[in-house]
Image (cartoon, rainbow, N blue to C red):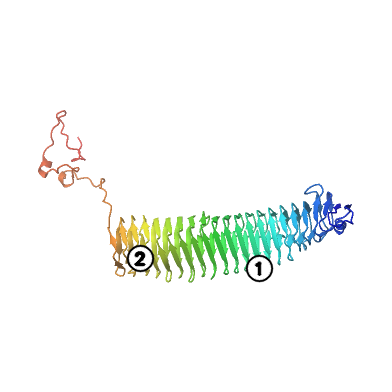
Amino acid sequence: MRVTLDGASRWRRRSGEYASMAEAMAAAETGDTVTIGPGVYRENVTVDKAVTVRPAEGPGTVRIEPAFGTGLALLASASVAGLVIECHDGSAPAVLVQAGEPELTDCRISTRSSVGIEVDGGARPTVRRCTVENAGGLGVRVSGTAAAHFEECEVLSAGQTGMVVRTGASARFERCRVHHALGAALVLTGPGSVVDALDCEFYEVNGNGVQAEDRALGRLTGCTVQRVSDNGLALDTEAVLELTGCRIHDIPENGADLRGRSVLRLRDTTLRSFARNGLSVWDPQTRVEAVGCEIRDSTGDYPAVWVSDGASAQLSHCRVHDVPDALFVLDQGSSAEATDCSFTQVRNTAVSVSDGATVRLDQVRVQDANTGLWFRDHGSGGLLTGLEVADVATGVIVTKGADPVLRQCTVRGSGEAAVYVSAGGRGSFEECTATHGKGFGFHVIDGCRTALTRCRAEQNARGGFEFSEPGPVAEGCVSDDAKPPPRPNRSGPRPRPGATPHRWYRPPAGRPRPSPRAARRPARRSRRCRTAVPPRSRWPNWTR
């Protein structure tokens, strides 16, 4: 082991060779370079000076393998590169960084320790192109007031969580990968804890993809979460996550699960192939805000967006498609807002509002669904403006005391009623249009006190407005009640033998109807054949 003396003191000899790492570190001064020959060093290495440590023959040729304790401790702004660190003490970290601004580059930590890399005590390290494989515990942990920067690192096969940032620490992960961990890929917890992740991948872990709790803040940009065993994102106890341009897919549970007054902000993010809810939002003051996002391809039988127990959701310029149900809002105090969004290819109900929840929809498009919107019970309602519903079985259903307000909405091409109100439902429809449906345009039964103002019904097969009992109030409404002409019955009963032909025979259009006397005249003989040939249209049952 050689120490090259690059320090400023002119009274020391320029280099020296030492038998152990401890001797070399004791002899080195700030700015020196410690070059390590190939081999296995069974000692605990402590770097407490701003020196450079590197292997003499390239990365991977020097292995530090102590019998117990920490393999490498960085206590100063040193630079360490190319080492392999193997430890077997489950009560200590393999690499401990506690002070300064050290750099750890091209190292491999293959260990069974409590933590692969532990950053604590106000240290501000930069870790580049390092691999951490710790089957005995955590992959990386950043704690206290430390601020760590990881670039192009890989954490795999961790016995617990892949990466943890806690108790007010901060970390930045760029182009990192976390996979095959026995816990969550990334956990951030504690007030003041901040994580920035850029172009990272979290996959094949036995837990949540990203888990935030206890007022922690996380910002993910261009990241991918996939093939985890639990939720893609899990937020609780006032945690905040902000995702931009991320991809969450192939999730066996919820794409994102929010509880306990947590906040999730999504922008230009895709959630697909989830078995439960794409967005599951629970508890008062819990909310999700999504802008320009896509939620699609559900693999289960659950709504894509679920809002309940007083939570709220805000969707803007989002697309939800190929799902069993698009948006379900439940419970008093729960609310959802959607602006310029589309809900298409929905197998059941696009928007369901129940148990006193409310929605506010503006310029929303619903297409190819079984039911467009369903306001189910007392207290459920909201304001819908500029809504377009097309190619559904039933456009809008209002039942059991629900009372929504719809303005300038259009339902086109419904298989049954465009608007159906029953069982004590109410609702106010202002300047709404029902057109080209196969049922009624506005169908109100059970004496429901529905208010319709300046509504139009056009080209509906069964009629424009159908009120089975007194109760609805229609003001300034217009309907053409246009019905398609009946098709001619060409398969009707044929006349009895001997029946008078004129009673059933109807000549083609443009020909004069024969008189009864002319119909009884004998048939004219043909010039070519002596057999009387009656007109085919007159005697369809005639045989020779």
- Secondary element at tag 2: strand
Find residue 427 and report its horizontal and vertical position in percent.
Answer: 37, 68
Q: Is residue 282 left or right of residue 477?
A: right
Name which residue type carries label 1: Gly
* Crowding at mark 2 (Cα within 10 Å: few <14, some 14-19, many 20+): many
Find residue 328 and report its horizontal and vertical position in percent.
Answer: 48, 63
Q: Is residue 197 left or right of residue 88?
A: left
For residue 234, above or below residue 544: below
Find residue 519 and report its horizontal and vertical position in percent.
Answer: 13, 42
Mark 2 or mark 1: whose residue is earlier in sequence: 1
Residue 190: numbered disc: 1
Q: Residue at x 13, y 36 (%)?
A: 523
Mark 2 to mark 1: distance in Å? 49 Å
According to the image, label 2 marks what residue? 429
Find residue 539 and report its horizontal and vertical position in percent.
Answer: 19, 40
Which quarter of the image is occupied by the C terminus? top left
Q: Is residue 126 something one can see in this rendering?
A: yes
Locate residue 397: give its quadrant. Answer: bottom left
Q: Is residue 184 something one can see in this rendering?
A: no
Residue placed most toward the observer, 35 or 289: 35
Q: Residue at x 37, y 64 (%)?
A: 407
Most extreme residue toward the left, as rendered?
517
- Secondary element at tag 1: loop
